[in-house]
Image (cartoon, grey):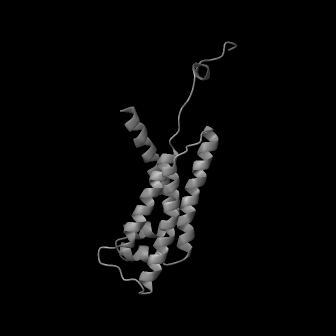
Amino acid sequence: MRKFFRIMIRYLCAIVWMGLLACFSYGGIILNFFNKNGIPFEEKILNSHKSNLMILINIGLVVMLFIDKLIIQIVTKQVNKNYYVDSLLVFDIILAVVMTVIAQAIVEKLFIPVDWFKLSYLSILFIILLVVYKAESLKIKHISSNDDILPTKNA
């Protein structure tokens, strides 16, 4: 039960952190989602991702989480060697570029997707993978001894 609780806390922290980062990066999309008079959600995602600037924004999210992982490793003095987590990072960078390329192809009518394909599916996958990456980077081993906890004899 403790292990499940720790996993839930890590993922909750990752979701909150990604929510904060997404507010800055995807503010227009989020506001349009809650605005009842706005353009359709899928169209807003398509319009925002057709710009090459969105590649920088998406890769910037990935880089922020990578730097955050490095800071966690420096502060805790531990190295979380997990190739599964590192492969998520590479996959997220590839997905960031692919989303923009597909959006540009759809806008320029070079690629007309079937009805079931939506760019929002890739965006949701991108965010989910970032949450998993953040949560797994928060995995820290807590190693202590009695000397670390008990007061010294001089006190």
Q: Quadrant of the N terminus?
A: top left
List x then y, in percent, for residue 60: 57, 63
List x then y, in percent, for residue 22: 49, 61
User: Which residue corresponds to the image point at 40% horizontal and 63% vertical from the top-left?
Assistant: 124
Residue 38 seen in the current view: no
Dividing the picture into quadrants, the one containing residue 37 is bottom left
Q: Is residue 2 above or below residue 139?
A: above
Q: Quadrant of the C terminus?
A: top right
List x then y, in percent, for residue 89: 52, 57
Residue 43 seen in the current view: yes
Q: Residue furthest top?
A: 153
User: Which residue corresponds to the image point at 41% horizontal and 87% vertical from the top-left?
Assistant: 109
Dividing the picture into quadrants, the one containing residue 64 is bottom right
Q: How many marks?
A: 0
Q: Is residue 63 above or below residue 54?
A: above
Q: Is residue 35 left or right of residue 63?
A: left
Q: Nearer the viewer, residue 6 or 136?
A: 136
User: Which residue corresponds to the image point at 47% horizontal and 46% vertical from the top-left?
Assistant: 13
Q: Residue furthest bottom?
A: 109
Q: Residue furthest front?
A: 83
List x then y, in percent, for residue 48: 47, 75
Q: Residue furthest right?
A: 154
